[in-house]
Structures are given as C-alpha cells and as structure tokens.
Image (cartoon, rainbow, N blue to C red):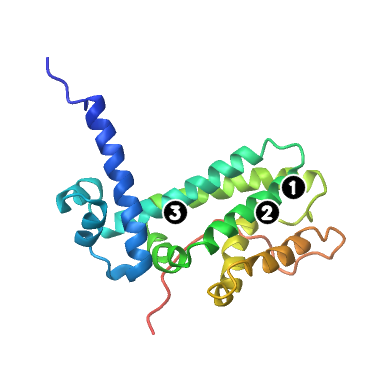
Amino acid sequence: MTGTTAAPGQRADHVRNRRLLLDAATAAFAEHGLDASMGEIAQRAGLAKGTVFRHFASKEDLLAAIMLQLLDRLTRNADRLHRADDAGAALREFMTDGVETLAADRAFCEVIGRPSLQHAEVRDAIDHLCVAVEALTARAREQGAVRGDITGTDIVLLLGGIHQTAAPLLAGEPEAWRRYLALALDGLCATDAGTLPHPPPGHLHFTDPEPS
C-alpha cells in the first residue's frame, strides 16, 4: 500500500526551503518594501518561483508567516520567563528582548507588521501572546514588582509604543530605544502612583486606517 507521507529527505527539503524563503523575503521586504516580488524572493533564496507558491499561496501569506515567527519567539520567551523566581526581573528581560527585536528591523514593523495584522493566524497568535504575557505580568503584580493595574495586554502594546517613540532616532542612534524603555519600566514600577485614568484594554482589534 502506497502512503502519502513525505520521506524524511523530502520533509527536510521542505523545512530547508521554507527557511530559505522566509529569510530571503525578510531581506527583500526590508530593502524594497511591499514592492518586492515573489520572483525576486525566489531568486534570493536560490529556488524556483513555483517553490514559493507551494509554500505560500500569496504575498499576504508570506508576510503573515514572517510576522508569526516574531510572535512565536515572543510567546516562547514569555513562557520561559514565567518560571523565573524574580517576576519583575523576568518582565524587564521580556520587554528588553521584545523592544530590541523590533528596533533591530524597522522595516519589519513598518512593512510587514501592519498588513499582516489582517491575517487570521496573526490575530490568533497575538491573542496567544497576550495570554502568555498576562501570566508573566500577573506574577510581577503578585510580587509587587509592578503597579497593580498593569495587564499583559498593556505590556504587549508598550513594546510597539516604545519602538515607535524611538523610531525617528534609530538610524543615527540605534540604542535610543533603551532610554524610552527605561522610562516605561520606571512607570510600570511606580506602585505608589494613583489609578490609571482609563480602564485596561480588552481584546485587541486591528483595523486598517481609513484612506485619506
């Protein structure tokens, strides 16, 4: 009886080709924005154009796959740090790694991030990230390391906010994000401050801006 399961060598080729395509696409989008073509990405990866479409049916699926890599990394990091004894230090480490990742590739956020937010898998992955970060943040609240009205969703939103604040400086001062991260961390630790003037965010909803 003949099965349809791929042989080990074929599976290894599939994984290798997918990795090559994601790396090539990330570089191409960083250089050329969304104008980068699937043909150019295939050429960078050293693969046939048809191979791209066997892995990714559209450019939107490819953008989403790149975004999912980042979200998976952040979620796994939050899960790992959740086991740390010092939850406050763990939360600081999580935020530092997250903002540093975003600051290292502005094109990622500006070119890949926004369109991929309309992809269902990316939205689900953001929800999973918020759950993982809430578990980490809850331990920091319990230990008195952060103010009691901070949530995991606040932390996830702050990652992008800190990066965007520093973005105009990063070309000339690539470490400028550390200043704004430190300011945000000081605010999170202000446990004797008054109640925040707006309720915590609920489920995140991402929409495209209205055309001008």
Nearest to the eye among marks 2 and 1: give it. Answer: 1
Distance of label 2 from label 1 (alpha carbons): 16 Å
In screen coordinates, is 92 left or right of 6? right
Residue 19 coordinates in the image, percent (x, y) = 33, 45
Query: Which residue type carries mark 2?
Result: Thr
Residue labelled with disc 3: 123
Query: Which residue type carries mark 1?
Result: Ala
Sequence-first tag of 2 and 1: 1
Quarter placement of the C terminus: bottom left
How packed mark 1 is, by other alpha carbons closer than 10 Å (few <14, some 14-19, many 20 or more), is some
Q: Residue furthest left?
A: 1
Residue 131 coordinates in the image, percent (x, y) = 58, 46
How packed mark 2 is, by other alpha carbons closer than 10 Å (few <14, some 14-19, many 20 or more), is many
In screen coordinates, is 187 left or right of 107? right
Residue labelled with disc 1: 89
Quarter placement of the N terminus: top left
